[in-house]
Image (cartoon, grey):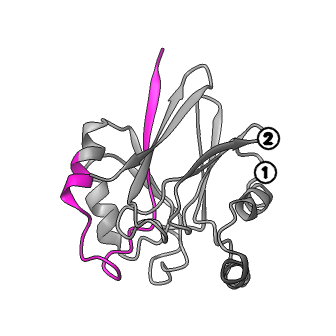
Amino acid sequence: MNTFKIAAVSDTHVPDRTPNLDPALLDAIALEKVDLILHAGDISSMRVIEKLQEIAPVIAARGNRDILLDPKRVPPLQSIEKYGVKIALLHGHINFLVYWIDKLQYIVSGYNRDRYVDRLPRVAPQAKVYVFGHTHHAENFWRQDKLFFNPGSVTYGDALTRTKTWGILELFEDGTLNSRIMDCP
């Protein structure tokens, strides 16, 4: 059975939080022999995309920190379909109003993934898979026959643990898929 393998990264924040992508991460992605790389925003610099393109083609979505990037090249929402599986790629902040409301909710009550479960399907209701970032918190769970997949952050890590992560999606020609979160080397 044919497969299509995707690496997912998010929140690289180069150069605002780190000067470069870790070469060990790039090697780990290359070892997976992926067909495509998805970047779920907060890229900060197009040189990140250029570096990832040395491994495989890249599709990227605009994050809240990507205001200097060309919106035609990096739009806020990308749609990908392979083997009948529709994937929505977006950062997760939706817009700056939602971003600030979410910040306030985070300060008051902490992280709550249900905020993303509620908002992402409204933006792309046709998707079966939502690849998103923004929180730096890795997520890989199904809800109502939809996969919510946040690869975390490869450079800054989770806000509480500082664990740096990325992800792999494997799509099969029968329309099934596997997903996993990977710790950065």
Residue stretch in magenta: 1-27
The one nearer the camera, 172 or 108, is 108
Mark 1: secondary structure: loop
Q: How many marks?
A: 2
Position of residue 103 measured from the top left corner of the image (x, y, whole percent): 66, 82
The residue sitting at 38% across, 38% down in the picture is: 35
Q: Is residue 149 left or right of residue 60?
A: right
Circle 2: is it few (<14), some (14-19), or many (20+) Cα within 10 Å? few
Mark 2: amino acid = Gln
Circle 1: is it few (<14), some (14-19), or many (20+) Cα within 10 Å? few
Mark 1: amino acid = Pro
Q: Is residue 131 magenta?
A: no
Q: Which residue is mark 2?
A: 144
Return the disc, 2 or 1, that comes first in the chain's sequence.
1
The residue sitting at 52% across, 55% down in the picture is: 138
Q: Is residue 4 magenta?
A: yes
The one nearer the camera, 179 or 121, is 179
Look at discs 2 and 1 and give the one toward the viewer: 2
Occupied quadrant, residue 78: bottom right
Position of residue 183 measured from the top left corner of the image (x, y, whole percent): 37, 50
Q: From the viewer's perspective, is residue 9 above or below residue 21?
A: above
Q: What's the mark number on residue 125?
A: 1
Furthest toward the top, the residue is 1
Position of residue 32 measured from the top left corner of the image (x, y, whole percent): 31, 37
Mark 2: secondary structure: loop
The residue sitting at 65% across, 69% down in the picture is: 111
Position of residue 147 measured from the top left corner of the image (x, y, whole percent): 66, 43
* CA distance for labels 2 and 1: 12 Å
Q: Is residue 181 left or right of residue 93?
A: left
Q: Is residue 49 left or right of residue 126?
A: left
Q: Is residue 40 left or right of residue 175?
A: left
